[in-house]
Image: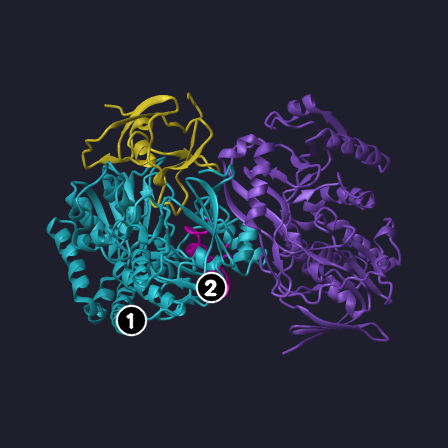
Chain colours: A yellow, B purple, C cyan
Amino acid sequence: MIEDVSRVGLFRRLVPRSGAVIPFTIDGEPTEAREGDLLLTAILLQRPALRHFEFGETDRAGFCLMGACQDCWVSLADGRRMRACTTPVESGMAVVIDGVAHD
Amino acid sequence: MTEHLAVDVAIIGGGTAACAAAVALREAGLTVAVLEKRRCGAGASGVNFGGVRQQGRHLAELPLARRARALWDDLNQLLGEDVEFEASGHIKLARSEADMAELERYAESAREHGLALTLLGANAVRDELPWVGPKMHGASLSPTDGQANPRMVGPAYARLARQRGVEVREYAPVRHAVSTGAGFEIEADGVTVKSCWLVNAAGAGAGVIASWFGERAPVSPLMPNMLVTEPLPYVVSRSIGVCGGDVYLRQILRGNVILGGGHGWGDVELGLARPRVEESLGCMARAVDIVPALAGAQVIRTWSGMDGQMPDHIPVIGFSSTTPRLVHAFGFSGHGFQLGPVIGLIIAELIDEGKTVSPIAPFGPQRFANWTDEPVAAYGGVQH
Amino acid sequence: MTDTAVVVVGAGPAGLRAAEALTRGGVRPILIDEAERPGGQVYRQPPPGAARSPRTLYGFEAGKAVAVHAIPARLGDAIDYRPNTLVWNVFEKHLYTVGPSGHDRLDFNRLVIASGAMDRVLPFPGWTMPGVFTLGGAQIALKAQGVSIGRRVAFIGAGPLLPLVVYQYAKAGAEIAAVLDVTPFSAKLSNASGLLAQTGTLAKGLWYIARNAIAGLLICSDVRAIGVEGEDRVRSLWWRDAADTEHRVACDAVGASFGLRSETQLADLAGCAFAYDDVARQWIPQRDAASRSSMPGVYLAGDGAGIGGADVAELQGERAALAVLEDLGAPIDTARIAALDRKLARQARFRNALERAYPYPAHLLDDVADAEIICRCEGITAGTLRAAATERDAQEMNRLKAFTRIGMGRCQGRVCGPAAAEILARTLGEDIAAVGRLRGNPPVKPIPVGGLP
């Protein structure tokens, strides 16, 4: 079976969650997270990276997960910038990775 | 263990102008020593906004700025490294009708001095700068102006100076200098220098140096208040200023937006400079008015440093009015970066030929001869 | 003492115990913390909705974690607790914050900085690839989010965190590809007597190692070199052991870091004097045994001024509070001070032995290629740093920063600083202390241009 690796998430849930489903989008594509997910987790459960690196042909997926390294800043369609590892995902957040943004 | 040097020209200060002068003097066959209290190019030369700008200057500075502009095109070749100069153009925004009238008046005077500026009305500004905020009444564009990297220029000149045989001494603050019959004797940490000529290019500390020679030079410390954002998609294609000068910003090709405005905090005795939060927050708000897309961006660093300013906001350049063979070049009042390369040539011309082709009469030190305020009493190593 | 503003920055174990002890002394401190919930990093609480039992999250330390978490609620109105608030600058006696209601300024009389630590990062081939996280980051993913950083994870460390994280992942059902310790096993043996100064802590550490071994998760010790391979994501990890044998395993995520590094930015802006600490391999703000810094009115507690761990942080937090109270002229509990000082001295012996048991893995920097990325924010390579040192007279860190942009990215030198200093020192043939440290500039973390977070 051929995987589309651009859609395979980096992270794996080891602990099941039972809280509310939180709908959000990545490049306009609807997806879901769970109550309690940080934005970084929400994205990396669905994607292999958070953003494209500005100074090379490579991607970034965060690093320290504690708000120190500043590697995980993502853009939302409304222009807000979020540090994904210290921001809870919210319903309706429109994450922009490849620049396709639908509000 | 104190070193003893004897040279034709001793230069106090190791910024861009000082090192550019050293290079030019070596070119003329003179021996030179540069005495820098900390690191070359790390003073005002290194902490400023990086605007390479003729537009907006006091008219007396325009001939110097126009001469300097020609030097910027060849600077990489001279210095042997990339100082990231881009002729991206400089836009000065009018945020009111009164501002626009000021720009029109200046454009008229500038034309007489050979600087061609293009005036833009409100619609033309939005065409030129699609990202600009809504309240602009117009702008003046100087297409040959631009920006460069201030962290690179001074140190590159210092490196070139060393390569050309200049005795560059860093961490050598000058403690005292006197005029003897034959020339000068200068005492710095770790080195004493005997010279025929002395150049006072000591930035914020130049007033103290001048006072050693009985010369009034009311230099006061000027701390720029600077900020820089994270890298952002490249949008701001021109270097931006405003009438009133309360904010200026430019975006480098890597994407960071550098912005500044107002004044930081400084302690001349301790040699410390820090940005002031209230000024920084004000700059940020004014920057968002000009570039609304900046609202979501993050500021990642702020800084300051210490420049020297004169009461009339134009520098002191020229022969001392009290002491033979003493040349002054200081007090650039927050806008010396673009001039640095030409100030070096002017200093060298004054020493080597006794005169300069540039019109420096308005900058003579004698204009402060009857100044009654006390100059700065002491100076120290600057941290920024 | 209601007219004296006492501020504690950081609600980890040090800050929480400091706030608590201050209230016992009749002070109502302001407790400011960046996170939503108290606990710092070591006792980090999951967000609401991701809760799990303290036993699961904190193991042997569950009791301690629960106790410090309870402090703000228990103190109630006796403290002015401000979570979700970043202190981004200190200047003279002013603190500048940004939080849910925008920008604010606090004037303080006494300031306790309990800023904690982050992982110490050293570069290796592939370290900036998506899927490579710090070891602490890998732990946070599991603890705070109940996720594994990948399907098949390799762990690399140089401290007691390694066996703990491996144990936690294994217990949660993760597939573990490899466990590498870049420090020599012999160092642990030769420092065993010092480690015995805290038999409880030692026993816990050994327990994790034993449990991992039972599960077949053997630590490969004394690893000499490592590298992560993959095109755009992690595919495999290779390493060279002490016998110079090369190994390779398939994996899709790596948790790797090499000890801890104090977060010293606020102490720097507050004007505290720093000294180079050879054991920490870092410039650290100086503090006395009572947690006073060199700056009158500023106190430093916890890992933010030297790594000591959570237990030491609690003691130092309380000790700092007692120093504040003493300096305010309040009556002091000399017996309690003496007891704290004794406990701290005992802990210090243990910590010294621990640092020697897990020595700084300088050998990882022996063969850094010119093409290796040192600054992940800006993509600056080792070759660029070396050229600046040899061709452009960059003799110290701030010059290196001016010429190469190292330390100018979003992290402002937190991640790249240690390695950059090593590379500069080695290139110049200097002692690492001789190349100095990056000058601190506000903000300590990014703040929004638009003013509101």
Residue at the (59%, 33%) spot, across then down: B289
**In which quarter of the view is residue B220 placed?**
bottom right
Chain bearing tag 2 is C
Residue C333: which disc?
Answer: 1
Residue B248: percent from the left, percent from the top? 64, 40
* Residue C308 at least partly seen: no
Chain bearing tag 1 is C
Residue C171: percent from the left, percent from the top? 15, 45
Helix, strand or loop at label 1? It is: loop
Indicate left or right for B58 with C342 as reference.
Answer: right
Mark 2 residue crowding within 10 angstroms, few (<14) / some (14–19) / many (20+): many
Residue C272: which disc?
Answer: 2
Indicate left or right for B308 with C16 as reference.
Answer: right
Is C417 inside the magenta-drawn segment? yes
> Type of residue at label 2?
Cys
Residue B316: percent from the left, percent from the top? 80, 56
The one nearer the camera, B325 or B75, is B325
Q: Could you give the CA–CA distance between mark 2 and mark 1, rounded to whole angstroms? A: 27 Å
Position of the N terminus of chain C, as image quadrant, is bottom left
Range shown magenta: C412-440
The one nearer the camera, A85 or C114, is C114
**Vertical comparison of C326 with C182: above or below:** below
Residue C206: percent from the left, percent from the top? 16, 59
Position of the C terminus of chain C, as image quadrant, is top left
Mark 1 residue crowding within 10 angstroms, few (<14) / some (14–19) / many (20+): few
